[in-house]
Amino acid sequence: MVRERELAKPLIGVLAVQGAFAEHVLGLERVGADSRLVRQPTDLEGLDGLVIPGGESTTLGLLGARTGLLDAVQRTLAGGLPVFGTCAGMIMLADETTGGPQPLIGGLDICVRRNAFGRQVASFEADVELTPFPEAPFPGVFIRAPWAERVGPGVEILASRGGHAIAARTDVALVTAFHPELTDDLRVHDLFLRMVREAGAHDSVGASPVHRKEGERVRAQ
Ligand code: GLN
């Protein structure tokens, strides 16, 4: 606690190309972070973390590729910036999807299936057991949600449904197939903020939280 109070209020960027970014801004404020909407590459400068919100991953990808934002985000994450992706954001951060190529940010060693829960149950709410929160289930809001069909050995699964990962993390990346920003439960945003503070604490003593091999964008550990 003392350590956390010593660190400045983190500044978290929220990718605001399309989708549910306003709700993330509110969630971040409520857990004690400042936020900045990210619409162009220069908006990425000086951030302590980045949120990729839900929306439509194909639209996010096409718009982001056209404006150069996708490349800029990839470069920024390669520098070790902590990132939190929800739903379409989880898809954007995946290294691959089962549905063939689409513009992605990538960097997280998972393969996602888009709209995995089927058309009949496009949107639903369900309690999710998340390993970091054993005290009570998390209210999961699923909207045409993906799941991870394959999760690399360096990625920790935080929650599963029907045998598929719906929340996962590394040291610097957090993804959920559901939408914590659409609930009053702030535990997932709080977890991301703790990851941001930890990465910042590493940085301040001169040890980057990310030690990548060539071509690797997000540390898998
Ligand atoms: N189905 C959307 C996609 O494939 C994601 C939906 C969401 O973010 N709520 O991008």
Image (tube, grey):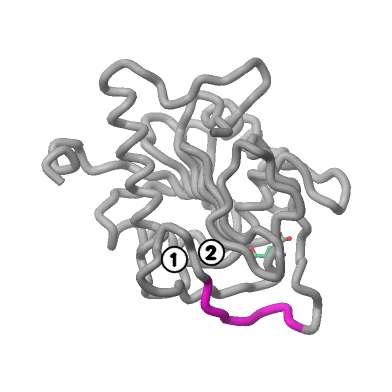
Locate the C terminus and report the quarter of the image it occupies: top right
Residue identifier under label 2: 20
Q: Is residue 73 above or below residue 156?
A: above
Give the residue type at disc 1.
Glu
Q: Kindly indicate the quadrant of the structure image that contains residue 202.
A: top left
Q: Is residue 50 above or below residue 221?
A: below
Neighbour tally class for label 2: few under 14, some 14-19, many 20 plus, Cα within 10 Å = many
Q: Can you give x and y, in whole percent of width and height, for residue 114 in the image? A: 76, 60
Q: Nearer the viewer, residue 153 or 177?
A: 153
Q: Are marks 1 and 2 in contact (CB under 8 Å)?
A: yes
Q: Is residue 124 magenta?
A: yes
Q: Can you give x and y, in whole percent of width and height, for residue 132 in the image? A: 42, 57
Residue identifier under label 1: 23
Position of 194 compared to 164: left or right?
left
Q: Can you give x and y, in whole percent of width and height, for residue 179 in the image? A: 53, 67
Q: Tell me the residue at 48%/63% (across/down).
A: 130
Q: Is mark 2 within 8 Å of ligand 1?
A: yes
Position of 82 compared to 168: left or right?
left
Give the residue type at disc 2.
Ala
Q: Nearer the viewer, residue 61 or 142?
A: 142
Any part of residue 48 in sight: yes
